[in-house]
Image (cartoon, rainbow, N blue to C red):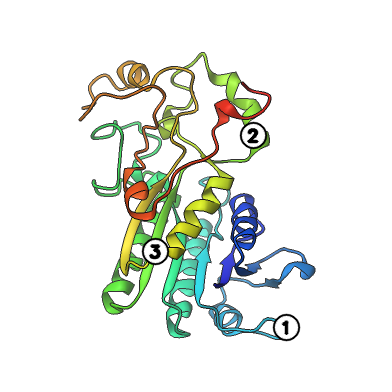
Amino acid sequence: MRIALTGGSGKLGRHVLKYLRDAGHSVTNLDRVGSRGEDFIPVDLSDYGQVVDALMGTDGHDGPYDSVVHLAAIPAPGFATNAALFANNMVSTFNVLNAAIKVGIRNIVYASSETVLGLPFEIAPPYLPVDERYPARPESTYSLVKTLEEHMAGQFTRWHPDLKIFALRFSNVQEPQDYAEFPTWQGDPEARKWNLWGYIDARDGGQAVLRALQSDRMGFDTFIIAAADTVMDIPSAELAATVFPEVELPRPLEGYETLLGIDHAREVLGFEPEHYWRTEPGLS
């Protein structure tokens, strides 16, 4: 594939870029910062004209592309004022999706977020593990934007039946060096309650993106993308009973299994996490 990747210089984006290139695909990084020697185009995604120009192909970068992966965004609540975050993330995602459709691209994968599930879970989830079946529950401006982006993407695919847009609800992205911090919160089940003790290794984020791109399904769909285990050394059933004693468990929880359900990604995309903090060298 010839892939335009926005945000390829970010924490997740760097690993997605490498994963896609290692798999043999041609990837151009569209971002504010990057290296000219690595197929990079500096783009302000809030400027629609720049986005269209980049996706059509600009000097030294032939286009148009056959696929788009959109990861670029202000990455979390608190990184900007609410109004600035809304204006940047909402407009940028509209620009990327709309421009891709206008230039004829029909294969789009983009980063949604675990936050739409109800983070920081001050209100308990409806059941555990959570999944994609219940309506979004945004509790921050960042999450509100992600929720609106999903609704927008669904409408785009309604307008264009030959279009695929997959929203990957990434959990808290971790690189290998981040795992050194994990032992510091093992004594407190509340420490990582805010996202149900979830995470995703950035390398597995690359796998999820590639599998989503390779799917031949059309339309819009959402997928939780998380590791298969939690960040804790406390069994998941004990975590649930301690922190969310009133929450329904539709089935028994096994071992350290994730409470961010990834069954849909497994079944539809063939996604299967390969990297776990507890087996990372130096932590075993």
Query: Which residue has dot 1 on it?
Result: 60
What count of labels does the image hold?
3
SS assignment at label 2: helix
What is the number of the mark on residue 215? Answer: 3
Q: Residue at x 28, y 78 (%)?
A: 159
Nearer to us in this view, 162 or 144: 162
Q: Residue at x 37, y 22 (%)?
A: 236
SS assignment at label 3: loop
Q: Position of residue 127 (x, y in %)?
A: 24, 33
Q: Mark 3, mark 1: which one is toward the viewer? A: 3
Q: Position of residue 248 (x, y in %)?
A: 21, 27
Nearer to us in this view, 85 or 93: 93
Quarter of the image with the N terminus in it: bottom right
Nearer to us in this view, 50 or 106: 106
> In the figure, is residue 87 to the left or right of 152?
right
Is disc 2 surrounded by few (<14), some (14 to 19) or many (20+) residues within 10 Å? few
Vertical order, 276 against 220 (above or below): above
Query: Which residue has dot 2 on it?
Result: 178
CA gap between label 2 and label 1 equals 36 Å
Mark 3 and mark 2 residues within 8 Å of each other at the beta carbon: no
Sequence order check, earlier mark of 2 and 1:
1
Q: Mark 3, mark 2: which one is toward the viewer? A: 3
CA gap between label 3 and label 2 equals 31 Å
CA gap between label 3 and label 1 equals 30 Å
Residue type, mark 2 in image: Asp
Q: Position of residue 67 (x, y in %)?
A: 50, 72
> In the figure, is residue 257 to the left or right of 44?
left
Task: Answer whether residue 92 is visible to the viewer in this image.
Answer: yes
Give the farthest residue toward the right: 37
Vertical order, 197 against 160 (above or below): above
Q: Quadrant of residue 196?
A: top left
Q: Position of residue 108 (x, y in %)?
A: 44, 69
